Image (cartoon, grey):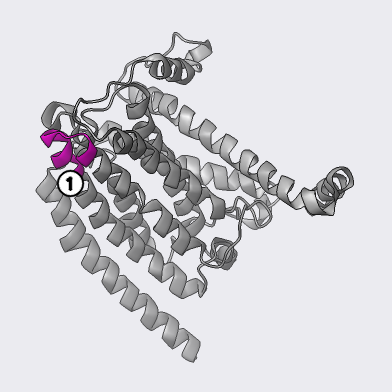
Amino acid sequence: MDEILKTVHATGEGFLGPLLWPLAWVVIKVVLLLAPVLFMVTYITLAERKVIGAMQVRPGPNRVGFFGILQPLADAVKLIFKETILPERADKGLFLLAPLLTLVPALLAWAVVPFSPELILADINIGILYILAISSLGAYGIIISGWASNSRYAFLGSMRSVGQMVSYEVSMGFTLIPVILITGSLSLVDVVEQQKDWWNVIPLAPMFVIYFISVVAETNRSPFDLPEAEPELVAGFFTEYSAMSSGLFFMGEYANIVLVSFLGALVFLGGWLPPVSLLSFIPGIIWLGLKAAFLMFVFLWIRATFPRYRYDQLMRLGWKVFLPVSLFWIFLTGLVVQLFRGV
């Protein structure tokens, strides 16, 4: 990989010169990063319908393209050409801005996600903190959508959704603190390299379980899909949205699923490291993709399996179970790390 990158840099500098090539290289990396991410966001919708269809003994989409592989493109074309209806008394500027505030932060977070020690757009030493900060901005899109719609249903739905996101983001953030204590760094590259002896899921198994359940709730997925329970809540915060504006909300949701799956694979499952050293000849990016794909499959599996929680059950689980357990595990990890360092 190092030799390939050196060749690419030498060729690029030969064509564009030493001043323009660094800028062009950043643009190339952004395109190379966003293209696979958008591809995964598009096709996880097909995977969801196929997996749930198989679990519920239904065929799923199988008419558009071979095995239905063109169905996401057909859905995108349908949404693009539908008319976007703007409510008469809505704040139209904020109404149209809100879906973008949900999708864009989920894409910006990828800037610090490493696919290998070399394949990363920006290896900053506060990578985990950056992801937590940038992903929390998605809550603004939801609360603004409810307020700008000028609808009681949408506003109440947005309040419920933001309450859910904030509650579980606290637990999710606490599950990452033991990892930071063990690693001594906020860089995701350092977190993965620290797992060469054993993956963090082994000593921090309870934190991994809490992390995964918390991200399921934070992304509003089943069984915590209370904001999108159409029969009961009239679609919650995006009641007044239609066509591509509602499609952007769904894209933001799926982009967050892909993001938290990769983050979970990096933080708890060894990232690009193979499970045993004998398999180190397989490129690390394939291992990372397989681990993230497994976590994404669990998202779909849960949706096809578990019934929806009630809102009071959701809040009780977050504040009375996950929060105390994660705080205790932070204390325990800090104590063990301090004793180990003392020895």
On screen, residue 22 versus residue 88, left or right, reads: right
Q: Residue furthest top?
A: 63
218 to the left or right of 254:
left
Task: Using the rendered image of the protein, determine whether residue 342 is visible from the camera's viewpoint.
Answer: yes
Q: Which residue is mark 1?
A: 159
Percent across and percent down for residue 11 are 87, 45
- Residue numbers of the magenta segment: 147-158
Residue 338: x and y in percent read 43, 85
Q: Main secondary structure of the magenta part?
A: helix
How many numbered marks appear?
1
Residue 148 lies in the magenta-colored region: yes
Q: Secondary structure at mark 1?
A: helix
Residue positioned 55% across, 43% down in the render: 289
Whole-percent x and y of residue 78? 40, 14
Identify the residue at the far bottom of this view. 342
As drawn, 48 above or below 60: below
Q: Residues within 10 Å of mark 1 (few under 14, many from 20)?
A: some
User: Does 343 appear above or below 280?
Assistant: below
Answer above or below: position of 174 versus 34.
Answer: below
Query: Any magenta on residue 275?
Result: no
Instruction: Note whether 187 is above or below 34 in the view shown.
Output: below
In the image, what residue type sits under mark 1?
Answer: Met
